[in-house]
Image: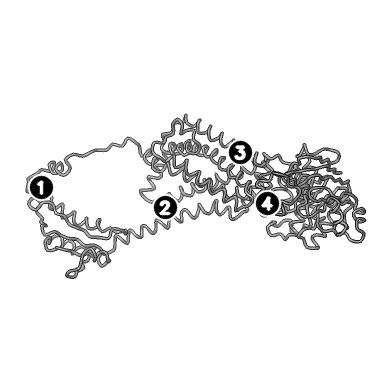
Amino acid sequence: MIDISHLAKKFKVENPKKLSEQERLDPRLNGKYFHSVQDVSLHCHGGEVLGLLGPNGAGKTTTLRMLSTAIKPDAGTVTIGGVDVLNRPVEARKKIGFLSGATGLYGRLTGRENIAYFGQLHGMSATAIEKRIDELSTMLDLESFLDRRCEHFSTGMKQKTAIARAVVHEPQVVILDEPTTGLDIMAAQTVLDFIRTLKDQGVPVIFSTHHLEEVSELCDRVSVINHGTTAFNDSFETFQSLAPGSLNRAFMTALEGVQ
Amino acid sequence: MWLVFFKEVKELLRDRKTLFFMVALPILVFPLIFGVVAYFSTKAVQQAESKVLEYVLVGGEYAPMLSEALANSDDFSLVKLPEGSDVTQWIKEGRADFALQVPDSYGDDVLTDGQVTLTLYLNDAGLNLVQRRLNAIVDKLSQQNQQQAFLALNLDEKQQIALMNPIVIDKVDVADKRENWGEKIGGFVPYLIFMLCLQGAMIPATDLGAGEKERGTLETLLISPIERHKLVLGKFLTIALAGVTSALVTVCSMAVWGIVLSQGMAIQLVAEFMSAISLLDFILIFFMLIPVVAIFSSLLLSLSIYARSFKEAQGYMTPIFMFTVVPVIMAMLPGVELKGGWAWVPLTNVALAIKELIKGTMDYVQLVAIFGSTALIAALLIGFCVHWFNKEKVLFR
C-alpha cells in the first residue's frame, strides 16, 4: 500500500511582475513563492485503484512527480508498504512504476529496446527482461510493432509501449499521469484493461484523469485536489453520493468543499 | 554508467543526420572542396598562360628590335590604336590586354643612352600573367644590351657579376625544415581540431540533454534507479566520444586526401614533414585533446540540459564557438610562448603545445602544467554538470 500525508511543494517565482492577471489571483501565490501543492493526503491499498481528479493546474502532476521522486517535497511523508521512501529515492524508484503525462520514447530505438533499457536501468537480468517483455506484450497487445522503431509509432502504440516500460520491473505501486489522454477509444480501453489486470494482481494504482466515466469504471477510491489541497479523499461510493445521478455534479460539489 | 553510454551510442549510430555530419561530411566534402578549388585554379592559370594577348605599341618605331620580337611571338597579337585615342581609356575598356609605351629616348646602347623606361598599361585587377610573359621577351633584350655594354667596357666575368650586385647578403636559416613549417601550420592545426571537436560534440550534446527534455523521456530517465552522476557520466562519455571521433575522422581524411591530391614534389614534402613528427608526439597531441574534449563536452551537456528545447540549446551553444576562438587566437599571436603563465591558461596552452610538438621544440616539463590545469577545469565542469543534473530548477524549467 501507499500512504501520502500532508505533502507540500513550493516553487520560486523568478519574476512576479511577469505573471498574468489570473495567475496573480491564485491564492497559492505568496510573495516570491508559488505554493503549487499545499496539503495533499491520500492513501491506496493493494488491489485498489485511486482516481486523482482536479482542474488543470490544481497540482495533480506536481503531486505525482513528488511521488515518483522526480522532485523533492518541502514537507510531508510518503510511505510504501510502511517504509518512508523520500529519504531513499533510489530505493523508492525500484518500488514505483511511473508514467508521466507527456512521456516519450527514444525514437531511434525499437519498442523492445526502449523497454529493455529501463529494465536494465532497474538492474534486471537479460533473461528476466525477455520474459517480462513477452508477458507484457501479450497483456498490452504489443507483438505487432514491438520490434519497429518508435519514431514511426502511432500515439496509441507509443502509450502502450510507455506503460510496458513503466512496469517492466514489476513495481509495488503504479502511478499513471493521465494515461488515456489523447488516445483513441480502443487504445484507451487497452490501458484501462491493463489497470484492471494490475488491480487483480493486488498492485495499488494511482492515476490522474479528467474522464469521470473511467473513474466510475475502475476506481475504488477518489481523491480530488483543488488549489494544491485535498478537497475530497474517500471511497468512490461516497463520491457518488455527493450528487446522486451525476458524477460531474459530484465533482463540482467536491471542489467546493475546499473553497 | 556504461549502460547509459552504450544505449546513447547505439542511438547515436542510428541517427543518420548526426552520422552524416560526423563522418560523411569530413570524408567526402572536404576533399571535394579541395578538389574543386584546385581544379578551377589550375584551369584559370592555364587559361591565362595560353591566351593570346592583344597589345598596343606606342612609339614602336624607336625600338625596332623590341617591336620585331613582339610581332614574332605567337603569344602576342598587335592591335592598332586609332589616331587621337587615349591609351589608358583604351585598356580600361578592355579593347587590348596591354599597351607598351616606348620613349623616344630609347636606344640599345646602354653606355650612351642610359637606362630606358618602358611604360606598361594594363588592368592588373584580375588574374593575368601579362608582366611575366612580357618580361620573357624584354629581359632577353635587356640582357643582350647588358652584355654588349660589358664587352665595350672590357670587363671580365668576375667584374661583371660584382658590378651587377656589389654586396650580397647570404641568409643561413638555423631553423630546420620542420620548425619552419611547424611555425607556419602549427598555429592553424589546433584551431581546426578544436573547432571540429566542438562541432562533432554539439549535435549529440543537444540531443542528449535538450532532446530528452523535448521528447519527454527525461523525467522517466530521472526516476529510474540510477544514480545521477552515473547518468551524467554516461552521457558525457558519449558526447566526448563523438567529439573525438569527429575530429579524428576529419584530420585523417584531410591527411589522406591531402597526400592523394598533392602529387609530385608536394608529396615528398608532406611525407618528410609527417615522418619528422614522432609517434610519441602524435600520442601526446591525442592525450592533450582528451581534457579539452572533456571541457567541451561537460560545458555542452550543462547548456543542453538547461535548455528547454533543441532550438534553445543551439542558441546557447553558438557563443561557445566564439569563446573557443579567443584562446586559440592568443596562441597564434607572436610572442605568446609555452612558458610561465601561458602554460596555465586553458585551451591556449594546449594550442601552444600542439604547435610546439609539431615544430619539434616541445619542452616536456610544461606538460605538467597543461594536463594539470586542463584536467582540473574539466573535472570542475563535470562536477558542475552533475550538480546541474540534480537541480529541479534546471530539469523542470
**Label annotation for residue B382:** 3
Toward the viewer: A13 or B31?
A13
SS class, disc 1: helix
SS class, disc 2: helix
The amino acid beneath tag 3 is Ile
* Residue with the mark numbered 1: B150
Toward the viewer: B104 or A152?
B104
The amino acid beneath tag 2 is Leu
* Residue with the mark numbered 4: A19
The residues bearing labels 3 and 4 have C-alpha atoms spaced at a distance of: 35 Å
Give the class, few, some or many, for how many residues have Cα within 10 Å of label 2's Cα (few <14, many ≥20).
some
To the question of a shared chain for discs 1 and 3, the answer is: yes
The residues bearing labels 2 and 3 have C-alpha atoms spaced at a distance of: 42 Å
Could you say where residue B80 lies in the image, as x and y percent from the top left? 19, 69
**Label annotation for residue B261:** 2
Could you say where residue B14 lies in the image, as x and y percent from the top left? 63, 53
CB under 8 Å between callouts 1 and 2? no
Residue at the image point whose x is 52% and y is 37% from the top: B287
* Host chain of mark 1: B
Question: Does label 2 or label 3 sit earlier along the sequence?
Answer: 2
Question: Does label 1 or label 2 sit earlier along the sequence?
Answer: 1
